[in-house]
Amino acid sequence: MAKLAIIGGGISGLAAGIYAQLNGIESEIFESHTVVGGQCTSWKRKGYHIDNCVHWMTGTSPKKEIYKVWQEVGVIQDPNKDIIRHDYFLQVDIDGVKAHVWRDLEKMRQELLSIAPEDTKEINIFIKLIKKFQAIELPSKLPQEQMGFGQNMKLLFKMMKAIPAFAKYKKLTLEEYAQRFKSPIIHQIIYNYVPKQFYVISAFYMYAMFSMGNADLPFGGSDAITDRMRDKYLSLGGKISAKKKALNAEINDKKITKINFADGTSIEPEYVIIATDLKVAFNIIGHNYMDDNLKKAFNNTTTHPVFSNITIYFAVDCPTNDIPTMEIFNCEPYTIVGREHKVVIVNNYADQPNFAPEGKGIIQILMVQHDDEYQYWEDLYNDPEAYKAEKLRIASEIQQRLEKHYPQYQGKLSLVEICTPKSFNRYLGSYKGSYMGFIQTPYAPKLVHHGNVDGIDNLCLAGQWLQTPGGLPNALVTGKFAVQRLIKRFNLADHFRQNL
Ligand SMILES: Cc1cc2nc3c(=O)[nH]c(=O)nc-3n(C[C@H](O)[C@H](O)[C@H](O)COP(=O)(O)OP(=O)(O)OC[C@H]3O[C@@H](n4cnc5c(N)ncnc54)[C@H](O)[C@@H]3O)c2cc1C
């Protein structure tokens, strides 16, 4: 039996496995699904590639600490071949007027000024803020408690440029900040495709990372991330057991002594990393082990809301390289769960090889669902006919708007897949179908959980939920940090070895 059992084979579990093996710790990943990857996954439907996750991956600039982590886990091998770098991240089209989030910030400034001269002052400030936030670093070398005074100071110094702006703006939501502009197109640029309740820092950060070349797309999409991590893990001698749903843990003398799986089997590991959705983790070990901070977060949907998505995939019976990689356009309002939506968010996979058969295209529509909308999907799922009918109604509403916006696709769109928040919950155990962890609002400080659980010594948690606002980079580093924490706690290796 492997020494270290890792429960959950998403990005955090795979990262934990890789760093365990790199440090000579024998490990095995136990994944409830048939494949590893968690939310960072894809599948085939009707001959098309359905990419579930990646719209942007932070950590593609060698100037940032996290780049090295993506390299160490095998995701970035040759940046010239592995990364797609677009000139712009997003096109917003409001009533036919188009604006872009350009990589070249001067070009973005000029374009916004020409569209909305009435917002000149705020546009200039916005661009300056994006530049300042290029200094932000996601600490990726060591867990915070293992960083010495010198390392903390170094990090602080690196981020110095962004700190005053951070302090000034951290109390504003995207929606509140957008009100400083008159132009509706700039409002949409600020919201982009994330919930308006996010704190505004998220927009500065996103565009800062994109413009400095630290947030791009991997060639091959989500699979490129997951497959390379899986292959790296296996090449280092790691083991993966699929279809192993952990049900509960037996805890004696402050140690997990046994983990029982749904198939009736059990293991008796020496050390454990649980790298599942956080609610699942506490279902396994018992909610009495949840600390007060986490309890408060789960109990307050204003300070710590959880957002999910509806994703719809349309096949296009012609190539789609005539539309942007990501576009948001306004449209006739449509209603989902009683809430009016006025835009459509489109992802186009034209530059991903083999996502669609020769001469055809595949596009994804993304629709954010709010915390209080999740229960609707949970209830509706109990009535399979009504659930199916509602999915088809939404797809049909969207198809009409797509055909109006892209008249060249009239009669060429066909529905291939639709996922609801309930789908993410069903397949991966994602709490309320969440696609990140708690989102970062202005109403609570950033949540950075140390992964340790009081009362269970041989356990460390990993996963995107430990650091708001989740996402791939947080999943990645928390997997690495969980191994570093166990190494330190149990003196498992002389020192943490990376990049062997
Ligand atoms: C639609 C969508 C779009 C996204 N887009 C982006 C993006 O553009 N950029 C970005 O950075 N992030 C994006 N994300 C988020 C990103 O996918 C996640 O942050 C990341 O994949 C989370 O990894 P994780 O390991 O923390 O958790 P998960 O992926 O949830 O992995 C947990 C794993 O544990 C398994 N598991 C659950 N319960 C058990 C159990 N009882 N026993 C054993 N195994 C169990 C699950 O099956 C899963 O494989 C997106 C997510 C979604 C859903």
Image (cartoon, rainbow, N blue to C red):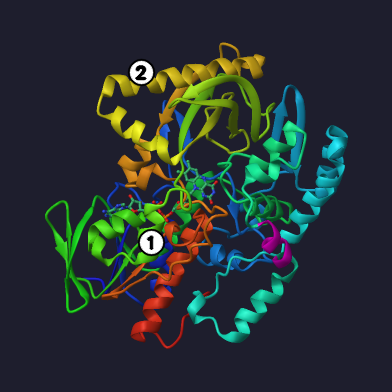
The residue sitting at the left extreme is 264
Amino acid bearing label 2: Ala
Q: In the figure, is residue 213 to the left or right of 402? A: right
Residue flagged by tag 1: what amino acid is it?
A: Leu
Callout 2 secondary element: helix
Query: Within the magenta stretch, is there residue 107?
Result: no
Q: Where is residue 220 shown, x and y percent of the image?
A: 54, 44
User: Is residue 318 depicted above or below 437 in this figure?
Assistant: above
Identity of the residue furthest to the top in this view: 411
| Label 1 crowd (10 A; few <14 / some 14-19 / many >=20) | some
In the displayed structure, 307 sits above or below 319; it is: below
| Image quadrant where one finds the N terminus | bottom left
Q: Residues within 10 Å of mark 2 (few under 14, many from 20)?
A: few
Q: Is residue 130 above or below residue 221?
A: below
| Res 90 visible | no
Choose mark 2 or mark 1, whichever is in front.
1
**Between 426 and 331, the one nearer to me in the picture:** 331
Distance, label 2 to label 1, CA atoms, is 37 Å
> In screen coordinates, is 385 left or right of 196?
left
Q: Of the residues under marks 2 and 1, which one precedes in the sequence?
A: 1
Viewer-side residue, 154 vs 333 = 333
Residue, disc 2:
389
Q: Disc 1 on helix, strand or loop? A: helix
Q: Which residue is mark 1?
A: 294
Which residue does the image show at 65% across and 66% down from the upper left?
A: 64
Prevailing secondary structure of the magenta residues: helix
Question: Which range of residues does the magenta coloring cover?
Answer: 163-169
Q: Between 183 and 39, which is closer to the camera in this rendering?
A: 183
